[in-house]
Image (cartoon, helix red, strand yellow):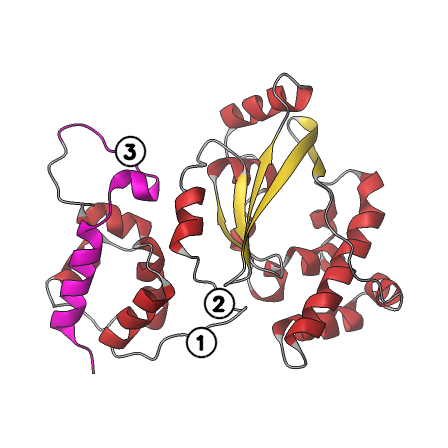
Amino acid sequence: MIDRTGLAGFLRRRRESLQPEDVGLPRGQRRRAKGLRREEIAFLCAMSTDYYARLERARGPHPSEQMLASIAQGLHLSLDERDHLFRLAGHNPPVRGADTEHISPGLLRVFDRLGDTPAEIVTELGETLRQTPMGVALTGATTRYEGPARSSGYRWFTDPAARSLHAPEEHRFLTRMYVAGLREIATLRGPGSRAAHFADLLLEQSEEFRRVWEDHEVGIRPHGIKRFVHPEVGPLELNCQRLLDPDQAHSLLVYTAIPGSESHEKLRLLSVIGPGTLR
């Protein structure tokens, strides 16, 4: 049973505890609201302001699990707070573990401050959960994929377009890295895991994957320098810094260029071109 009064109070209290700078929004002038406005939270949760407002007023429809997941992420809830939200709404909380897509508040706070930098949050299987606008401008909107294709490693072997953004001399290494990484995760998570399922799919679909899989390589880590070939600005050499959230197996990847370098100037140009370049 949904506890509408408890849900309304919890949502209101969490909204009022957040400030615009906590979630990457501009504060603006003449701000009188205590915490975030309802329309700001609705924007962060990808829902209408009216829908969210009715929840805070203990009215409206019974929110779905998908809607609750969006609210939990928009309000920057911890896992305990997320689970409490689900129970107030009459749902069982999602199972915790490596497959969770709920991003921790700490990782989100860092991400929200990177609006002018190419950055993304990914799962251990390379599924993009969040991208900054500059991240979209660099690699395209990788959050749009569904099913196994959400994984960058899966797309590497099933979608030729996935290789077009990487320098040809990097392809052999990236092939080995994706296979070795999937082997490690499948062994760590065990039979029946999504990683094992992805491996089975690729063994069926890709002769290249089957050939490299037979080498039983592990421990191949990404290079610190990423070499991209962007269709608008050309070759880019970017440093990739990784911040790992060990509790939820998510990584924040941040791409930067050496100041004064050609790639640095190309990133500045990319910021002008904007995220509409690649889709």
Label 2 element class: loop
Badge 3 marks a residue whose secondary structure is loop
Q: Position of residue 129 (x, y in %)?
A: 50, 54
Disc 2 vs disc 1: Cβ atoms closer than 8 Å?
Answer: yes
Which type of secondary structure does the marked residue at label 1 adopt? Answer: loop
Residue 174 against residue 257 in the figure, above or below: below
- Could you tell which of marks 2 and 3 lies nearer the N-terminus? 3
Tell me if I can see residue 69 in this picture: yes
Residue 53, image x, y percentages: 15, 57
Which label belongs to residue 100?
Answer: 2
The front one of 187 and 38 is: 187
Q: Residue furthest top?
A: 260
The label on residue 26 is: 3
What kind of residue is marked 2? Thr
Residue under numbered circle 1: 95
Q: Residue at x 33, y 54 (%)?
A: 76
Q: Which residues are magenta?
A: 1-30
